[in-house]
């Protein structure tokens, strides 16, 4: 039975529809673009973890809204990440690449498909109506 790690992510959207993307610095999936997120700390709620990870990786404070989707990422037979992705809007801070981010940038929805992204993220963004369908 694989170990499951709870993770929370923030899908941060600007008023013009652009999504804040981070280029992952560390494994898993280093070098690929994703939304900010990471492991939930003991005693932390999923929305609080999403907000904390967003700040640590982007320098922005966010208001976390509804859960958009839950997905599973199996890294091997022994480890599975359960990813809980939440809608979020920026409320302050200074945009800068933080602890697990090699780069951070606002990406217009129409350009999301041109980034080398972590597997299945673009499909989830499309299903949530945040990226154009093919």
Image (tube, helix red, strand yellow):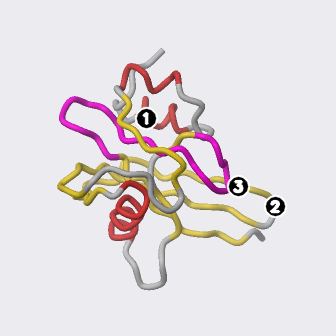
- Magenta stretch? 12-32
**Magenta stretch encompasses residue 42:** no
Category of crowding for the residue at label 1, using alpha-carbon neighbours closer than 10 angstroms: few (below 14), some (14–19), many (at least 20): some
Lower sequence index among marks 3 and 1: 3
Residue at 39%, 20% in the rendered image: 132
Asked whether disc 3 touches disc 2, contact meaning CB atoms under 8 Å apart, the reply is: yes
Lower sequence index among marks 2 and 1: 2
Category of crowding for the residue at label 2, using alpha-carbon neighbours closer than 10 angstroms: few (below 14), some (14–19), many (at least 20): few
Task: Quote the CA–CA distance across marks 3 and 2.
Answer: 7 Å
Looking at the image, residue 94 sits to the left or right of residue 100; the answer is: left
Residue matched to label 3: 74
Provide the secondary structure element on which disc 1 rests.
helix
Pinpoint residue 51: horizontal percent, then vertical percent: 33, 63
Residue at 68%, 62% in the rendered image: 80
Q: Which mark is residue 77?
A: 2
Task: Quote the CA–CA distance across marks 2 and 1.
Answer: 27 Å
Location of residue 20 by image quarter = top left
The quadrant of the image that shows the N terminus is: bottom right
Pinpoint residue 33: horizontal percent, then vertical percent: 54, 40
Residue at 57%, 49% in the rendered image: 24
Seen in the picture, residue 3 relative to 67 is either above or below; the reply is below
**Magenta stretch encompasses residue 24:** yes
Residue at 66%, 48% in the rendered image: 29
> Most prominent secondary structure in the magenta stretch?
loop
Seen in the picture, residue 108 relative to 2 is either above or below; the reply is above
Residue matched to label 1: 125
Location of residue 54 by image quarter = bottom left
Looking at the image, residue 45 sits to the left or right of residue 92; the answer is: right
């Amino acid at each position: 039975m694989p170990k499951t790690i709870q993770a929370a992510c923030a899908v941060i959207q600007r008023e013009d529809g652009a999504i804040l993307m981070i280029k992952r610095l560390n494994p898993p999936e280093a070098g690929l673009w994703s939304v900010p997120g990471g492991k939930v700390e003991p005693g932390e709620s999923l929305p609080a973890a999403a907000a904390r990870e967003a700040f640590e990786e982007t320098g922005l404070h966010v208001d976390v809204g509804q859960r958009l989707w839950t997905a599973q990422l199996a890294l091997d037979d022994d480890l599975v990440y359960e990813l809980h992705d939440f809608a979020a809007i920026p409320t302050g801070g200074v945009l800068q690449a933080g602890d697990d981010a090699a780069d951070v940038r606002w990406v217009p929805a129409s350009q999301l498909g041109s980034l080398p992204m972590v597997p299945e993220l673009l499909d989830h963004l499309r299903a949530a109506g945040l990226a154009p369908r093919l």
